[in-house]
Image (spheres, helix red, strand yellow):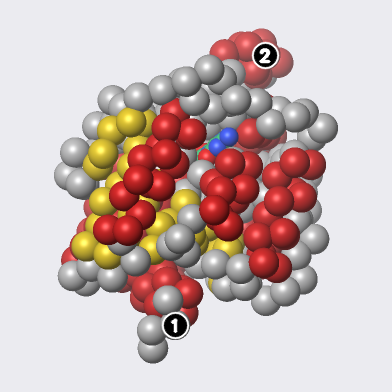
Amino acid sequence: MKLIFVSTPVGSLGSGVGGGVELSLYNAAQEMLRRGHQLQAIAPANSTRLDLPIVQIPGNYQPMAQNQERTEPIIMPENPVIANMWEYARQVQDDCDLIVNFAYDWLPFYLTPFFRKPIAHLVSMGSLTNAIDQIIPQIVKQFPGTVAFRTKTQAQTFGIEEECCYLSNGIDLSLYNFCLEPKKQLAWLGRIAPEKGLEDAVAAAQITNIPLKIMGRMQDNSYWEKICSDYPDAPIEYLGFLSTDKLQQVLRECQGLLMTHRWVEAFGNVVIESLACGVPVISYRRGGPGETVQDGVTGFLVEPDSVPGLVEAIARIDEINRYTCRQEAESKFSVQALGDRFEKWLYQILKIQ
Ligand code: HBI
C-alpha cells in the first residue's frame, strides 16, 4: 500500500507534547515500512523523528483537547498547522492509496467526505468535548470500518455501539530489558497533569514508604507544586521526560508501576512499556488499562480513585510472576503484533484480502 500518515497538531514529532500518539505513529510507520509498504508522514515543523520520511509543515499548534471545556467550540489559531497539514494531504492524495489520521481533532473528521481517497482515523483518547463527540460517531456511521480505537471501553465513551476495530497498541520490545530482581521502588509514568492523578500515587508512596520514581513531561507546574506541598515527606523523585532507553533503565528495576489516571485513558502506553520490562501494573479499573491489565496475572486492577486500594495491591505485588508480564507483552503488544492488526484494518478499508 502507498500510505500517508498525518500526525497530531499539538506539537512536533519527537517533542513529547503529543504523548503516546507520537510513539504510536512512529511504531506503526516503522512496521509498515518494514513490511514493504510505501509511507510518508506529514507532521508539524521542527519534528526530530528524522528516521521517518516526514514532510514538515509550518503553522501554529492546536490547543490540547484535554485542556478544553466539554462545551468549548472548535478553536482554530491563525495559520493553523492542522489545516496546513491537511491542505498538503489534499494536494498529494492522488499519490497514495489511503491516508491515516492520528489527530484527535474535529477538522480531519470533517474533511473526510471531501477527499477522493479513504481516510482511516485512529482515535487516541476517550470522549472529551461535545463537538468531537458529535463528529466521530457520524464518520463511524458514514464510513464503516474507517475509525479505529485503542479499546472498546474508549469507543463506548463516544456512545458508539457498532463493532469497530480495536487496535490496542504495540511497542518495540527490543528497547525494553527484562529484570527479574527489582529494587524496593515503584514507578509512575505520564504527563504531569491533573487528568493523570499523580497525587494518589504520591499518597500511596507516603503510606507505604516505598520510593516512587516519577517520569514524564512536566505539563502543569502548579499541579506539581501543589502535590509537593501536600505531601512534603513522601519518598518521591521526579526524573523528568526521559528517552525510552533511560526510562526503561529505571522502570525495569521497579517492583510495580502505578496507574492512577482520573480520565478514561484510551489505552495507556505505559502499561505495555511496564509489562515489556516484566514489571507488574497496579491500575485503577478505568479505561484502557482496565482491559489491558489481567487482574492477578500481570498486575492488579483497583477500585478507581481508591488510595487504600493502591496500598493493598502494592502489598501483594510479589504475587505476580514477572516472566508472565514480559510474555504478555511479546504475544500481544509487540510492534509486529500491532502491525498485524494495523495492516489488517487498512486492508479491510481498501477491501484487499
Ligand atoms: N489534543 N487537540 C488535540 N489533538 C491531538 O491530536 C491530541 C491532543 N491532546 C493529546 C494528544 N493528542 C496525544 O497526547 C494523544 O497521545 C493522547
Q: Are marks 1 and 2 in contact (CB under 8 Å)?
A: no
- What residue sits right under mark 1 in the picture? 351
Q: Which secondary structure, mark 2?
A: helix
| Residue 104 appears left or right of 333 | right
Q: Which mark is residue 226?
A: 2
Badge nearest the viewer, 1 or 2:
1
Residue 70 in the image, given as x and y percentages of width and height: 79, 34
| Tag 2: amino acid | Lys
| Residue beneath the point at 58% across and 41% down | 107
| Residue beneath the point at 39% across and 88% down | 353
Q: Distance between the Cα atoms at labels 1 and 2?
A: 53 Å
Nearest the camera: 12 or 188? Answer: 12
User: Can residue 24 be seen by looking at this rendering?
Assistant: yes
Nearest the camera: 219 or 82? Answer: 82
How many marks the image carries: the answer is 2
| Residue beneath the point at 71% across and 51% down | 135
Q: Which mark is residue 154?
A: none
212 in relation to 341, above or below: above
Residue 28 in the image, given as x and y percentages of width and height: 34, 59
Residue 331 in the image, given as x and y percentages of width and height: 39, 76
Examine the image and state in which quarter residue 18 appears.
top left
Looking at the rendered image, the quarter that the N terminus falls into is bottom left
